[in-house]
Image: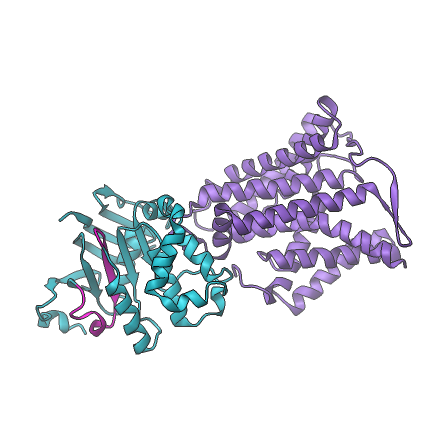
């Protein structure tokens, strides 16, 4: 199995604030990793740091063996588009949608990574099969959609690219339990092939038993190491929830 | 007051202001930068067109192409100086405002140095003569202005609707971080925005220079008017800018006919103050959501 992502001694934060303190992890092809932890303990920052969106960061991040991390003291987002074109898709908290653009525009924009652009029609079919409700909304501006529909657009946009590594930040945030369960189900059914997926989620029960490994993030440090699908969570990890 | 005359003047002014305001508006929403150097682009495009008219060809197409091309180059230059080195530094909106203001002032002096203080006149590219519509008389140059600017506006809008680059720009206008997340390169997209809006200013320069002379600081008034229209329209809103251009053009036409040309700036500014008092986000604020 090849390593899709290898994070080594990653620290990151914003301005004077340090959020992550020496995080190391490895994600292999075909894995679905769940990252759990309380609000403010660094789940989103970890995903943002991988996409180069934090205020500063140091430590190594390798995507498919290519270094995308390194030390950076300013310029959040400066290299994000390059990292994305190298095969990363981040579906962030708050969705980062374009409110005036239609659902169809969003799906097209998800295919900006060069190879995907030519195949965007077929890709759209495939993504709409995962999120059927979107096919009726293609001409709607995203600003008019409900929260659940917006989350679907955000996830669908992320799936339109050639990404080898999918990062999903809090798929359940702000949604009714039934809807978030449906979204997580959809995420579990995606065929990863030789890619991998990391889901950050506060609600442990949504991921339990569904992901390959669960990692706990507490006060900017990974705790609990690897917990396999069939092992129960260590008491020490549960303690934080 | 002759209604035909009013409508024709309104449309002429609106199409030219629309070109300038749309540029300012698009730059603001996609790059987050208030481009004070749009007036410089305007002035330098006039000179570009004049140089071609003097040395190469007097034909309308050549003069317009020269103005549009100079405008695009000037836009690229402004982008390279004021956007690329600054955009990821703290306090970018203020820094870029000062940078573009500096480009505008230096550029004006540079033009004065190179071309001297004597104003230049562009050839009448649409020829002389006029047509009768209803009771109004419309000159060929007015028809030419309207046709050219509407054509450029339509081409730009169609391009932004249907091309990949256009979608990238629209995405960036709505949410720069989201755009970076789908792989839009901020820098290369910003340069194409600067070139397209520069080309718009360049066309506006050639069209306005049919009535006014080309001079080093000719861009000041168009910049102010473009800014007024962009603000009244709601910075960042394309449809808002177009509606505001029509309204401001109408006010100018009515004021010029009813009160006299010297009151035009007064009524225009009273109008924009009224708009911003009632709707702080401008006309476009009620139509679409864009960068706050």
For the residue pair B12 and A124, the one nearer the viewer reads as A124
Which residue is at the front of the view, B251 or A74?
Answer: B251
Instruction: Note whether A26 is above or below B43 in the view shown.
Output: below
Q: Is residue A28 visible?
A: yes
| Residue B31 shows in the view | no
Question: Does residue A193 sit above or below A236 in this rendering?
Answer: above
Left or right: residue A99 compared with residue A163 = right
In percent of the image, x 69 and y 58: which residue is there?
B244
* Position of residue A39 measured from the top left corner of the image (x, y, whole percent): 27, 69
Q: Identify the colour of chain B in the image.
A: purple
In the image, the segment drawn in magenta is: A193-211
Along the horizontal axis of the image, is A181 left or right of B169?
Answer: left
Residue drawn 28% across the image and 58% down it: A167
Whether residue A49 sits left or right of residue B68 in the image: it is: left
Image colour for chain A is: cyan
**Residue displayed at 49% across by 69% down:** A144
Instruction: Name the residue: 26% across, 44% down.
Output: A70
């Amino acid at each position: 199995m090849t390593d899709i992502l290898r994070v080594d001694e990653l620290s990151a934060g914003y301005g004077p604030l340090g959020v992550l303190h020496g995080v190391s992890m490895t994600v292999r092809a075909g894995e679905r990793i769940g990252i759990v932890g309380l609000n403010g303990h660094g789940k989103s920052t970890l995903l943002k740091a991988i996409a180069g969106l934090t205020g500063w960061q140091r430590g190594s991040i390798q995507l498919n063996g290519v270094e995308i991390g390194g030390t950076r003291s300013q310029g959040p987002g400066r290299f994000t588009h390059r990292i994305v074109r190298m095969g990363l898709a981040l579906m962030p908290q708050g969705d980062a949608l374009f409110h005036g653009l239609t659902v169809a525009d969003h799906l097209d924009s998800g295919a900006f990574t060069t190879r995907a652009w030519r195949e965007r029609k077929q890709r759209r079919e495939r993504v709409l099969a995962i999120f059927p409700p979107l096919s009726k909304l293609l001409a709607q501006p995203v600003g008019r959609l409900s929260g659940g529909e917006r989350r679907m657009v955000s996830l669908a946009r992320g799936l339109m690219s050639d990404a080898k590594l999918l990062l999903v930040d809090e798929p359940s945030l702000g949604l009714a339990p039934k809807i978030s369960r449906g979204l997580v189900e959809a995420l579990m059914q995606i065929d990863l092939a030789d890619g991998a997926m990391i889901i950050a989620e506060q609600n442990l029960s949504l991921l339990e038993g569904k992901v390959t490994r669960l990692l706990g993030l507490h006060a900017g440090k990974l705790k609990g190491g690897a917990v396999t699908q069939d092992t129960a969570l260590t008491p020490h990890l549960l303690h934080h929830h | 007051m002759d209604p035909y005359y009013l409508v024709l003047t309104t449309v002429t002014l609106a199409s030219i202001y629309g070109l300038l305001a749309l540029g300012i508006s698009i730059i603001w929403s996609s790059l987050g930068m208030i481009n004070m150097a749009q007036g410089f682009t305007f002035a330098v495009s006039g000179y570009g067109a004049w140089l071609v008219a003097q040395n190469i060809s007097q034909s309308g197409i050549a003069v317009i192409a020269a103005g549009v091309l100079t405008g695009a180059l000037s836009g690229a230059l402004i982008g390279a100086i004021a956007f690329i080195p600054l955009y990821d530094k703290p306090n970018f909106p203020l820094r870029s405002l000062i940078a573009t203001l500096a480009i505008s002032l230096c550029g004006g002096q540079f033009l004065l140095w190179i071309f001297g203080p004597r104003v230049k006149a562009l050839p009448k590219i649409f020829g002389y003569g006029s047509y009768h519509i209803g009771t109004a008389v419309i000159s060929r140059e007015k028809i030419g202005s309207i046709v050219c600017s509407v054509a450029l506006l339509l081409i730009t809008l169609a391009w932004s609707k249907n091309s990949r680059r256009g979608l990238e720009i629209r995405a960036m206008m709505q949410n720069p971080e989201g755009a970076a997340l789908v792989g839009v390169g901020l820098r290369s997209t910003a340069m194409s925005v600067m070139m397209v809006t520069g080309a718009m200013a360049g066309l506006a320069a050639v069209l306005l220079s049919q009535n006014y002379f080309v001079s080093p600081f000719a861009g000041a008034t168009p910049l102010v008017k473009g800014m007024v229209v962009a603000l009244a329209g709601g910075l960042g809103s394309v449809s808002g800018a177009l509606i505001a251009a029509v309204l401001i053009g109408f006010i100018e036409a009515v004021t010029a006919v009813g009160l006299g040309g010297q009151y035009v700036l007064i009524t225009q500014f009273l109008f924009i103050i009224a708009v911003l008092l009632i709707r702080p986000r401008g006309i476009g604020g009620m139509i679409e959501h864009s960068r706050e």
